[in-house]
């Protein structure tokens, strides 16, 4: 069964599978069950004869299964700097798989999707976790007949998924790259998300149309989040106190709508976002990030005779998941007997979003990490253990 997606897919190469049909539900970390579970995914490159050149890319909070374009006539992807021909995740060398996360709104089952009664889940969609996202990724790979991974790579929420995968299923891949991410949210992160959550729910509560209220609140939440993705220095460099361009106000009063270009930028980003994202998905994914605590649950790192390689990468200008977050991950892994390399970028002043951009040192580190995995002896590569859900 293929469910209708929300919104329309950005790429014609989007594919769908249902690894958890109605008779075989996904067992959620909270103890609940969910079925059917559809997964939207894209693949890039070719699977080699030994089927061991697979790189799984995990996307961030508002990403989807389209990290890169498939050709000149395709829409740009969200990680063009990392994925593609000649890029660190080289699609001439690797078979790349990327899937929309559980709870998302770009084809994988989320609040927008219908349950067994053919009625959209809506507010009744169950609580999900980062562990559930990984369980769905692994079930997708099993459905596709992929038994081993060269690497799992992800940034931000994608890095949380990568870290969860490493701790609970370390034998699935030769290496794991956790980029601009964290093992758990800081109090500051939680506070920003609390404000965003309040904006969505309070707007829905006061609007005569709950759906319109959810969307209005989501717009405010997106503005809040966007400020955490950019550094103060980059905002100052791009906008400073520059005035809006003439005629760009949507309201005649400067008291209601400010005079400054930075406000117009946030409004523009919000308008684009509301055309492609669902408020309920945003709430569920943000909640999963807030509850994520990677080292609180037992890990399986001790089960491997040969440990995977691990790259942690952070950006000094990142005020969301700065170097201290990656260092916490490194010390947590070290305490469990796994050495990880933590590299810090000091060249970019962009902030958290630097992991999505052309930052030469970062891209070189990612390429070098993957090249190192290619040199690992085949004997140390394990098989993907099928996910039971």
Image (tube, grey):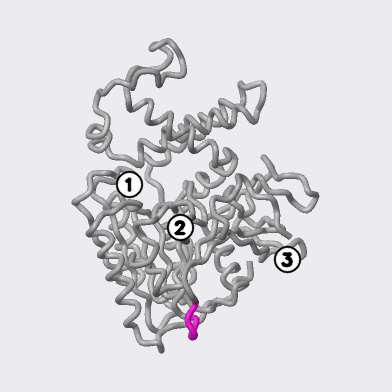
Q: Residue at x 25, y 45 (%)?
A: 317
Q: Position of residue 72 (x, y in %)?
A: 44, 57
Front residue of this view, candidates 141 and 182: 141
Q: How many marks?
A: 3
Note whether 46 is above or below 22 in the view shown.
below
Q: Which residue is mark 2?
A: 69
Which marked residue is nearer to the observer: mark 3 or mark 1? 1
Question: Which residue reaches farthest bottom?
Answer: 379
Q: Residue at x 66, y 66 (%)?
A: 19
Q: Is residue 43 magenta?
A: no
Label of residue 7 in the image = none
Task: Report how far apart the C-alphas of labels 1 and 2 lie in the structure.
Answer: 23 Å
Q: Residue at x 39, y 63 (%)?
A: 84
Front residue of this view, candidates 218 and 32: 218
**Horizontal arrangement in the rendering, residue 178 relative to residue 98 (left or right):** left
- Where disc 1 sits, the SS reads helix
Q: Position of residue 83 (x, y in %)?
A: 39, 62
In the picture, the quarter occupied by the C terminus is bottom right
Task: Report how far apart the C-alphas of labels 3 and 1 lie in the structure.
Answer: 39 Å
Q: Which residue is mark 1?
A: 352
Q: Is residue 50 magenta?
A: yes
Note whether 305 is above or below 21 in the view shown.
below
């Amino acid at each position: 069964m293929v469910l209708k997606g929300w919104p329309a897919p950005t790429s014609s190469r989007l594919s769908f599978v249902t690894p958890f049909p109605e008779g075989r539900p996904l067992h959620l970390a909270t103890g609940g069950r969910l079925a059917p579970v559809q997964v939207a995914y894209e693949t890039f490159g070719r699977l080699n004869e030994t089927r061991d050149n697979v790189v799984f890319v995990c996307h961030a909070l508002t990403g989807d299964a389209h990290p890169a374009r498939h050709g000149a006539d395709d829409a740009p992807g969200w990680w063009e700097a990392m994925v593609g021909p000649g890029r660190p995740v080289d699609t001439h060398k690797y078979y790349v798989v990327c899937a929309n996360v559980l709870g998302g709104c770009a084809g994988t089952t989320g609040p927008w999707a219908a349950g067994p009664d053919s009625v959209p889940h809506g507010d009744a969609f169950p609580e999900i976790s980062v562990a559930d996202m990984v369980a769905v990724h692994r079930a997708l790979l099993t459905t596709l007949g992929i038994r081993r991974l060269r690497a799992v790579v992800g940034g931000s929420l994608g890095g949380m998924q990568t870290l969860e995968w490493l701790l609970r299923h370390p034998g699935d891949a030769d290496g794991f790259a956790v980029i601009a991410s964290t093992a758990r949210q800081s109090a500051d992160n939680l506070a920003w998300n609390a404000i965003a959550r309040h904006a969505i729910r309070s707007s829905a509560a006061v609007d005569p149309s709950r759906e319109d209220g959810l969307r209005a609140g989501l717009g405010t939440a997106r503005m809040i989040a966007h400020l955490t993705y950019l550094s103060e220095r980059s905002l100052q460099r791009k906008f400073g106190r520059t005035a809006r361009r003439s005629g760009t106000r949507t309201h005649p009063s400067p008291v209601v709508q400010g005079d400054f270009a930075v406000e117009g930028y946030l409004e523009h980003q919000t308008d684009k976002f509301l055309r492609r994202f669902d408020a309920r998905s945003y709430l569920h994914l943000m909640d999963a990030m807030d509850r994520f605590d990677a080292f609180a649950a037992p890990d399986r790192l001790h089960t491997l005779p040969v440990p995977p390689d691990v790259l942690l990468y952070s950006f000094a200008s990142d005020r969301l998941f700065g170097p201290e977050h990656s260092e916490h991950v490194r010390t947590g892994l070290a305490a469990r007997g796994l050495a990880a390399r933590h590299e810090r970028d000091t060249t970019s002043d962009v902030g958290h979003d630097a992991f999505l951009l052309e930052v030469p040192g970062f891209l070189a580190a990612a390429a070098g990490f993957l090249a190192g995995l290619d040199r690992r002896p085949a004997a140390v590569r394990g098989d993907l253990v099928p996910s039971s859900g």
